[in-house]
Image: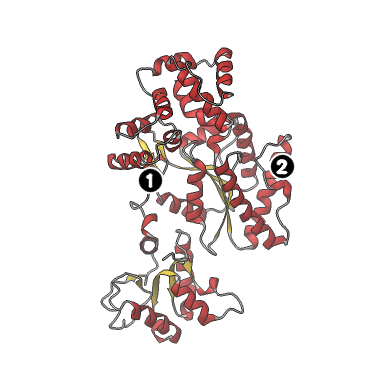
Amino acid sequence: MEFEYDVFLSHSSSDKEIVRKIAQGLASRGVRVWFDETEIEIGGNIPSEIEKGLTHSRHVILCMSLRFFASDWSEAERSGTVFEDPANKRGRLIPLLLEDCEIPPLLAPLKYADFREPDEAILNQLADRCLPADSRDGQDTLEPPALGPDGKLHMVRPKVVRQILDFLHDSARPGVAILEPFGFKASDSIKKVVDHLRVKKNTLLPIQIVPDTRTDNDKRLYRACERDVQMGIEQLFGYPLPSEWQAPFDEVADEEDHAYRFEELVDLLQRVASRQNKRLLLVIGGLGRVSPARLRDFGFFLHRVCNHGLKLLVWGREELDALRQRTGDADFSVFHRLEPVQMEPFTDEEVRELAAQIGTRAKAGHIMSETGGHPALVESVLEAGTPLDDEDSIRAHLLRSPQMERLRDHLGGMDEKVKQRLHLFSSLPEIPQGIEETPEDRALVWLGIMQRESRNWSWTAPVMKELGK
């Protein structure tokens, strides 16, 4: 069963102040909380809404106090939950002690969380207990990889989501923008983060912006973002998002006008968030497919927006350094980042599992898109015995020794002759017969095909970077 909420807070109205803090603390940690104060609207049917809340919540926290056990409403909520599972074998019931009181016999055998002295550590434990297993630390699915400072493959785990929430919760500024590591299926990864953060009636208003919407995947993500933006605008002003704001990062002739509209859009979204008593979370993904020139302009846009009060969170040092290089002497002191120590290396078992996942979809092009073209992971996948077809073999050959040095020498300079050759290959519908006589030509054919398919250079960036060493 899919639960709409992670936890239902059963409490006495007399304990509302402390329970409200508990609700806010859990929500800031990514827990979807059913709390009557936020879930029951004026004019709502209270018994019906409580029943729905209990039915659609994965767990029920009993906020135990003298007033709780004296409340008829609390007794009804408690009795219904205990009746379903008297021994609490499914672990749905979570007792939370707010003050010294006599605990009824059916609850006495259960270990309770002690909140008589409010403690952040207890909130962390409750959040871990309430969140579904696939979003807890150590129980996550494999995420797109990156290389850490130690040169090892690393992965971003769900705990990063909690760090983002804590960062946002403690921030004096109104919002955070997250930059995904360049490449590595950034749009998909960003969407997973947004899905984690998108909790009903939480304190966040997540808005996703995709800089380049030319691929089908990005267009789908952008349409989802556009719906979120329009919902916020309509709630505040009663009319849809103006058409000139619906594609703020698409091709624009006047870059100054482009930047101005982006700042105006962010200002508008911040007012939407403020009116809804939420904090704006501006999520920016898909940067791996943006050309260096446009990324430089985009960096300037971000810098100007930061000066208008938007705090920016960058994942990893390489991303921050890349933005700095593309924006010259711009002051990025307002940028904050998650240090690489918060990313954990792949274990050998995880590499094998990832290789197996890729191997099940090892059709033409998949190995490169799944690995982001990272030579280390490509090698790991190949060593795991992943079956490859001819086109994948060409791509793997591009990254493997002993031909790498020759390829670097041949392609590293990218002189006009090579560019013309690459342009020719990019216009061909398929690999011509007899042209793959050398590894260099195979590399050019592959790069040309990738350029044609993506319509820009970014998909080839990991390989070009490797060749340019």
Mark 1 or mark 2, which has the lower sequence index? 1
Q: Is residue 18 visible?
A: no
Q: How crowded is mark 1: few (under 14 residues within 10 Å), some or many (20 or more)?
A: some
Quarter holding the N terminus is: bottom left
- Residue at horizontal 58%, vertical 34%? 290
Separation of marks 1 and 2 at Cα, in angstroms: 39 Å
Is 167 on the left or on the right of 311, as rendered?
Answer: left
Q: Position of residue 223 (x, y in %)?
A: 61, 50
Give the amino acid at mark 2: Tyr
Secondary-structure class at tag 1: loop
Q: Nearer the viewer, mark 1 or mark 2?
A: 1
Q: How crowded is mark 2: few (under 14 residues within 10 Å), some or many (20 or more)?
A: some
Residue identifier under label 2: 260
Q: Where is residue 400 in the image (x, y as percent from the top left)?
A: 37, 23
Secondary-structure class at tag 2: helix
Quarter holding the C terminus is: top left
Is 318 on the left or on the right of 293, as rendered?
Answer: left
Seen in the picture, residue 142 relative to 101 is either above or below; the reply is above
Q: Quadrant of residue 110?
A: bottom left
Is 235 on the left or on the right of 215, as rendered?
Answer: right
- Image mark count: 2
Q: Which of 69 and 131 is in front in this view?
A: 131
Residue 327: mark: none
- Residue at horizontal 30%, vertical 40%? 352
Seen in the picture, residue 45 relative to 171 is either above or below; the reply is below
Q: Can residue 53 be seen in this view?
A: yes
Residue identifier under label 1: 142
Q: In which quarter of the image is residue 348?
A: top left
Q: Position of residue 231 (x, y in %)?
A: 64, 59
- Residue at horizontal 51%, vertical 53%? 168
